[in-house]
Image (tube, rainbow, N blue to C red):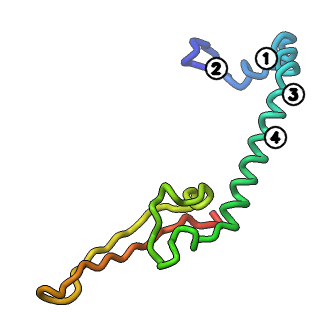
Amino acid sequence: MREAGIQTKAEYQFAHDLLRRSEIQAEIKRSRPAFGDLHFRLAEESIATLRAMANADITQLYDADGNLLDPQEWPADLKLLVSGIEIEERMQGEGDGAEMVRTKKVKLESRRA
């Protein structure tokens, strides 16, 4: 209210008075159905996303050999669940026989949250 330049001791009273004005009520009545449809569509999309996340199969992040796929190849619902990836690299063995070993761990968001 102050940002709009309205000076009043009781902003809630001003808002209440605005909502009682006939032109404001008419605009709310006119636009309410459109907002209802929009909210319904957004709710349906959110429910579908949450359902996909709850039923996500984490094995789809890996190839047949157990290697982590490129994130661009991950299904969209699984991308939403991933909160991070840890990659640990270490040398195994000695001399010419040494090889780099990578361990990749995928951290997921809590499905409950």
Q: Quadrant of the rendered structure where residue 38 is? A: top right
Q: CA distance from mark 3 to mark 2?
A: 34 Å
Q: Residue type at mark 4: give it.
A: Phe
Mark 1 falls on what kind of element? helix
Name the residue that disc number 3 marks.
33
What whole-number distance in Å separates the C-alpha atoms at marks 1 and 3? 23 Å
Residue 106, percent across and down? 46, 69
> Where residue 35 sits: x, y (%)?
80, 30
Q: Earlier in the sequence, mark 4 or mark 2?
A: 2
What residue does disc 4 label? 40
What residue is at 82 percent from the left and 22 percent from the top? 31
Q: CA distance from mark 1 to mark 2?
A: 14 Å
Label 3 CA crowd tier, 10 Å (few <14, some 14–19, many 20+): few
The residue under label 3 is which amino acid type?
A: Pro
Q: Nearer the viewer, mark 1 or mark 2?
A: 1
Tag 2: amino acid: Lys
Q: Quadrant of residue 96?
A: bottom left
- Is 18 situated above or below 42? above
Q: Is residue 18 left or right of residue 62?
A: right
Q: CA distance from mark 3 to mark 4?
A: 10 Å
Can you identify the residue that label 2 sits on?
9
- Per the image, label 4 sits on a secondary structure element best described as helix
Camera-side mark, 4 or 2: 4
Farthest-out residue, left: 95
Residue 15 picture location, percent across and down: 73, 21
**Residue in the foreground of this view, choosing between 51 and 98:** 98
Query: Gap in Å between the C-alphas at discs 4 and 2?
Result: 37 Å
